[in-house]
């Protein structure tokens, strides 16, 4: 079985092979290139930050009480999860 190359797959491989940073100035020292790489990596990838987890300990929903059960055996049923 042979794999066919499509224009989309060749564009994807070409994008993966291209360097992310190209030094144009031939006089750039290793320290200058390292400083540029550090600045660009500090900028991040541009993705939105992850959402904060919901705090359930102090949530107002916890203050709402379950309805009181009436009748025979209600005290037993009050301890059972709903």
Image (cartoon, grey):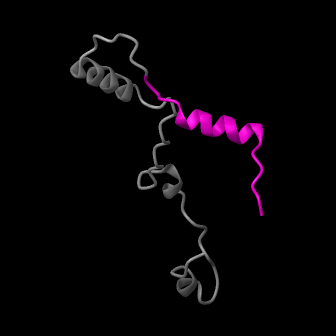
* Quadrant containing the N terminus in the rendered view: bottom right
Which residue lies at the image location 63% right of the left edge and 79% below the top edge? 70
Instruction: Give how far across and how far down residue 12 sits, in percent.
Output: 64, 38
Locate residue 35 relative to residue 5 in the image: left or right: left
Which residue lies at the image location 54% right of the left edge and 62% below the top edge? 65
Which residue lies at the image location 61% right of the left edge and 68% below the top edge? 67
| Residue that extends furthest to the front in the rendered view of this protein | 2
Give above or below for 29 relative to 48.
above
Who is closer to the viewer here, 14 or 69?
14
Locate residue 56 relative to residue 35 in the image: left or right: right
Locate residue 35 relative to residue 18 in the image: left or right: left
Instruction: Give how far across and how far down residue 45 sits, in percent.
Output: 47, 32
Give above or below for 48 relative to 82.
above
Instruction: Give how far across and how far down residue 8 sits, in percent.
Output: 74, 38
Query: Which region shows up in magenta?
Result: 1-21
Who is closer to the viewer here, 22 or 36?
22
What is the tally of numbered marks visible in this picture?
Answer: 0
Instruction: Give how far across and how far down residue 37 sits, in percent.
Output: 33, 25
Say which quarter of the image contains residue 73.
bottom right
- Residue 19 included in the magenta stretch of the image: yes
Give above or below for 43 relative to 57.
above
* Quadrant containing the C terminus in the rendered view: bottom right
């Amino acid at each position: 079985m042979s794999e066919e190359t499509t224009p989309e797959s060749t564009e994807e491989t070409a994008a993966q092979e291209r360097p992310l940073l190209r030094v144009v100035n031939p006089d750039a020292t290793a320290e200058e290139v390292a400083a540029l790489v550090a600045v660009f990596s500090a900028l991040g990838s541009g993705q939105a930050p992850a959402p904060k987890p919901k705090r359930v300990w102090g949530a107002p929903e916890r203050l709402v009480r379950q309805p009181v059960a009436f009748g025979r055996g209600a005290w037993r049923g009050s301890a059972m999860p709903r």
